[in-house]
Amino acid sequence: MADARKTAHTSNHSAPVEPGRIDAPAPMAPPPRLPDSDCRAVASVLARIGDKWSVLVIMQLADGPRRFNELKRRVGGISQRMLTLTLRGLERDGHVKRTIFATIPPRVDYQLTELGRGLIEPTQALGQWALAHIPEIEGARAKFDAGNDRD
């Protein structure tokens, strides 16, 4: 005679599961500990490509070369000095190539290098995630600020 209790199987478990029971996913193994020198190197790279201006500049260069003033117009709120510093830093790290054309006046284009193009997908994903979660983040900030307003 069949047991009246039903069992369910999941693709990664072989033992029966009681109806209505949801197993928590197995905890992930902690990432390996990096030597201090590796951590500093990773932090240095992330500091360059993770700052807000670099991400926005990379996103603007994803479609092809742009001139300085075009980038300045497209990256709202960035000052000329900050755009210069950002482009120099990205160029120094090999993400952006600067090309000077011998015209009058001289024309300068900035474009992503092959290394820089590797950043398009992650920066676009990060930007899309940020846009999709702005209302939640603003709500969390307002809630936090309201609960921590002690001044």
Image (cartoon, helix red, strand yellow):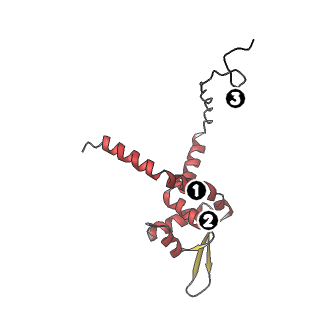
| Residue nearest the observer in this picture, 106 or 24 | 24
Residue 50 against residue 3 in the figure, above or below: below
The crowding category of the residue bearing disc 1, from other C-alpha atoms within 10 Å (few below 14, some 14 to 19, many at least 20), is many
Question: Which is nearer the N-term, disc 2 or disc 3?
Answer: 3
| Cα distance in 3D space between marks 1 and 3 | 35 Å
Residue type at mark 1: give it. Answer: Thr
Q: Residue furthest left?
A: 151
Quadrant in the picture for the N terminus: top right
Q: Mark 2 = which residue?
A: 62
| Cα distance in 3D space between marks 2 and 3 | 42 Å
| Cα distance in 3D space between marks 1 and 2 | 10 Å
The crowding category of the residue bearing disc 2, from other C-alpha atoms within 10 Å (few below 14, some 14 to 19, many at least 20), is some
58 left or right of 83?
right
Q: Which residue is located at x 59 percent, y 65 percent?
A: 91
Number of marks in picture: 3
Residue type at mark 2: give it. Answer: Ala
Callout 1 touching callout 2 (CB < 8 Å): yes
Which tag is nearer the camera, tag 2 or tag 3? 3
Q: Mark 3 = which residue?
A: 10
| Residue nearest the observer in this picture, 116 or 21 | 21
Please state the horizontal and vertical placement of residue 80, each as a whole percent of the image: 45, 71
Q: Residue furthest front?
A: 1
Which tag is nearer the camera, tag 1 or tag 3? 3
| Residue nearest the observer in this picture, 31 or 130 | 130
Q: Which mark is residue 123?
A: 1
18 left or right of 56?
right
Q: Secondary structure at mark 1?
A: helix
